Image (cartoon, rainbow, N blue to C red):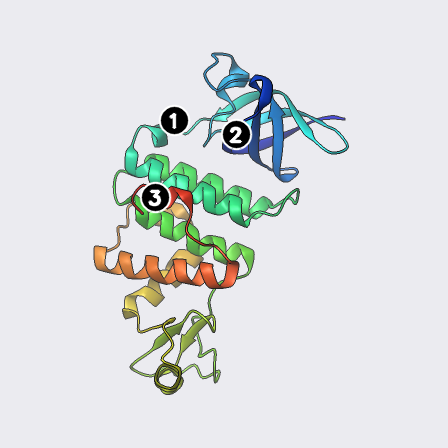
Amino acid sequence: MVTDTEGIILRQIKAANGRRMILMFSKKFGKISVGSGLTEGGKSKSALSIRPFTHGRYEIFKGRDSYNLNGGQVIKSYYAIGENLDKYIASSYVLELTEKLLPEELAQPKLFNLLLSFLGAMERREKKQETLMLAYMVKLLDVLGNMPVLDHCVECGTKDLGKKRFFSVKDGGMLCSVCGERMAGDDNEPLIYTPNFGIVDILKYFRNNDFSTFEKIALDEAVLRELKIILKEYMAYHLDIGKLKSEEFSL
């Protein structure tokens, strides 16, 4: 069966006999591996469409157990991302993280649109690219239904969190002063943090607003580092996401 779909190219893998396997986040089928005889270095429209970060429209032959690329056309290449090292590193992390969390062959239209919004915002962004990367991580958790609890204590349920608040990675959200002091003291739990209060507001802001509203917002370096640690620990615990290959660059 021959069909077509929009897709975002996540990465390529060299295969035998000069062929390539294209890992694509397709709008119609979700994450799929597509065989192709095209090479990225070619000058045809189809060759240009298989580069990572590219949003394109693809004609695919769907067999019983495999997919094969018949051709592709670029909708948006996001070439500016590859021309800036900081953009490239942050965006590579986002693509790899998305790939790890996507199930095979299950359409995820909200996440597809979220990734497109991120790529567009990243291409336009001039500095502090990690801020946008962290915003994507928060919005990704929300789309997947794994957003941490921020408005009440996950242990006792109170909305009065007190002056000294805690964030528990293991329990999935905020702890009030009483529960936080008890749990941190009794268990000596390394996954309980006492975050800068602004971090909770930042998490809510990232969750509730479009990328376009904070394209020019840049987090303070200390806040950025703390938030990055918390989010990565949270994803490692709840989504089984360990260190990614793209982190070897500098993240």
Q: Residue at x 59, y 44 (%)?
A: 109
**Label 3 neighbour load within 10 Å: few <14, some 14-19, many 20+:** few
Looking at the rendered structure, the kind of residue marked 1 is Tyr
Q: Which of the labelled discs sits on residue 136, or is there none?
A: none
Looking at the rendered structure, the kind of residue marked 3 is Glu
Q: Nearer the viewer, mark 1 or mark 2?
A: 2
Q: Is residue 47 above or below residue 248?
A: above
Measured as percent of width and height from the top left, residue 15 is found at 57, 25
Q: Is residue 127 above or below residue 67?
A: below
SS of the residue under disc 3: helix
Name the side, left or right, on which 59 lies relative to 147.
Answer: right
Q: Is residue 66 above or below residue 143?
A: above
Name the side, left or right, on which 222 lies relative to 70.
Answer: left
Nearer-N-terminus badge (3/1): 1
Measured as percent of width and height from the top left, residue 34 is found at 62, 29
**Numbered disc total:** 3
Looking at the rendered structure, the kind of residue marked 2 is Ile
In this view, which residue lies farthest toward the top? 43
- Residue 168 sits in which quadrant? bottom left
Measured as percent of width and height from the top left, residue 131 is found at 31, 50
Q: Residue at x 29, y 44 (%)?
A: 250
Q: Write down the residue under mark 1.
A: 79
**Label 1 neighbour load within 10 Å: few <14, some 14-19, many 20+:** some
Q: Write down the residue under mark 2.
A: 13
